[in-house]
Amino acid sequence: MLHIVFFARVKEQLGCAKLELEWDETLASIDALQEQLCARENGAWREVLSEDNIIRAVNQAVVAGDAVLCDGDEIAFFPPVTGG
Amino acid sequence: MLHIVFFARVKEQLGCAKLELEWDETLASIDALQEQLCARENGAWREVLSEDNIIRAVNQAVVAGDAVLCDGDEIAFFPPVTGG
Amino acid sequence: MTSSNATHSASGEVVRCQVDIQESDFDIASLQAWLLSGSAGEGAIATFTGYVRVDKGSANFQCMELEHYPGMTQDSIGAIVNKAAERWPIITARVVHRVGRLYPGDQIVWVGVSSAHRGAAFSACEYIMDYLKAEAPLWKKEYSAEGECWVDAKESDSKRADRWAGDSTD
Amino acid sequence: MTSSNATHSASGEVVRCQVDIQESDFDIASLQAWLLSGSAGEGAIATFTGYVRVDKGSANFQCMELEHYPGMTQDSIGAIVNKAAERWPIITARVVHRVGRLYPGDQIVWVGVSSAHRGAAFSACEYIMDYLKAEAPLWKKEYSAEGECWVDAKESDSKRADRWAGDSTD
């Protein structure tokens, strides 16, 4: 199982805070996962998830490029941070 | 009258916290005043007041080189500061 | 949600540090007292407090809501504190960041760092704030008479963090 | 001995500031509260607290005595605060420095600066501390089992102040 979480503007625009997907070989990288998510809701998700500045994290660590996903991983998508 | 004050190590070494001298033309600059003070106590004051790092202030403002003294001025001699 | 930690400082000493993410307000005097070990080894404490600010131009601002990524927020701030501790000889460090609904004038964040010397305390405190702003997964949404609006990230915030990359320790 | 002041900040606004030289201890929470104007214009407060520190090597340290030049101390610190206010858009600033007999762990000095933004608050606070150390007429004498000894000025303190001379504001 992949545990996928969304935060802030991304969460609101998708209307979704979390999602669980069965892990399989077609979801073995974060780029592959993101492409599958973009296909949801007739492309409505693509608009949100393909924004340039979207940040991706695997198991609560930000990843810069593509990253391998394993069964059980927690993947997050969120906008640039604005705390402090 | 010139109001002369000493602080910290300088005050202790001179054994003197303050001193008043009648102003006259021979005391019209801080260099002249310092030279007169150095002559006190058979040169014991010279040892203290001729230290390289001694700081001089006229009317509570530090002066870098020589400075004109007027009747009523407050002149201070003190070592490098160590507050904070 | 508290993350306590003991890491090693640039001076080789163990650094006592704690990161809290909480809805409740915080008391700066208690936080600063926590930084003192009791051994009088600290000569210097530098602190930063961030407040909900009302811009002069936006009279309609009402409040803000702070969202975060539970778990990752503490860990990411903890990692920033550890990096500061590797770089400067700090003795203790503490970070508190509030989440939830906050109003004008409310305290948002507090960072405090103790050290034997003031240069290390100042630098580490500012470093932690700069990276917290640039990296910790927290998001602000503003509510005003006109509606609600996610705050946009500022490029200046990532630049402030970047400047530490080429900087020598001092 | 209090010196209150209103000067103009880099932002053109009036800066509320106060400098106190006193024997009594101070309460950091009250001081920080004083910095807040109530208008929620401050987004940031940076503070520094200096403490009487005991070096690991000097177990015989007992206490220190802080002497100052009454009048000139307040004025010189006030002038430093004004220079900081000309350089950064600060809103309020407060400095308290204790004199007299102080013991290990005692608070010596507190500097607090508020601003809309953190960069100005941090820079102004550190600037004020650096120049206070380098210029304010205060002197420390240490008492230990071996006797009494005036603290020597550190060259590093005048260097820390000097570095602001060539620095750009940020």
Image (cartoon, coloured by chain):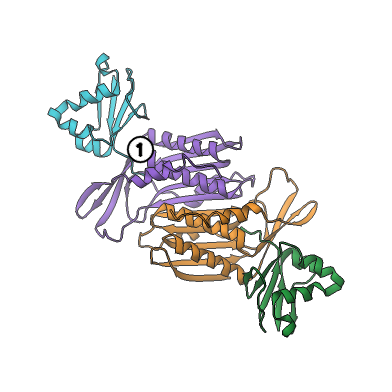
Chain colours: A cyan, B green, C purple, D orange
- Name the residue nearer the viewer: C112 or C56: C56
Find the residue positioned furthest to the right.
Answer: B42
**D21 relative to D109, above or below:** below
Numbered-mark total: 1
Residue drawn at x 61%, y 64% as measured from the top left: D136
Residue B2 shows up from this direction: yes
Residue drawn at x 80%, y 72% as measured from the top left: B38
Q: Secondary structure at mark 1?
A: loop
List x then y, in percent, for residue A84.
38, 46
Q: Amino acid at mark 1?
A: Pro
Residue drawn at x 62%, y 73% as measured from the top left: B60
Q: Is residue A11 left or right of residue D118?
A: left
**Residue C13 placement: quadrant:** top right
Find the residue positioned furthest to the left.
Answer: A42
**Residue A68 placement: quadrant:** top left
Q: Is residue C55 left or right of residue D22?
A: left
Name the image quarter holding the N terminus of chain A: top left
Residue drawn at x 57%, y 56% as measured from the top left: D162
List x then y, in percent, for residue C165.
46, 39
- Name the residue nearer the viewer: C117 or D166: D166
Specify the subunit that label 1 lies on. C
List x then y, in percent, for residue C109.
41, 47
- Name the residue nearer the viewer: B16 or A16: B16
Residue B23 shows up from this direction: no
**D138 relative to A78, above or below:** below
Within-10-Å neighbours for mark 1: few <14, some 14–19, many 20+: many
**Residue C35 placement: quadrant:** top right
The residue beneath circle 1 is C137
List x then y, in percent, for residue C128.
46, 43
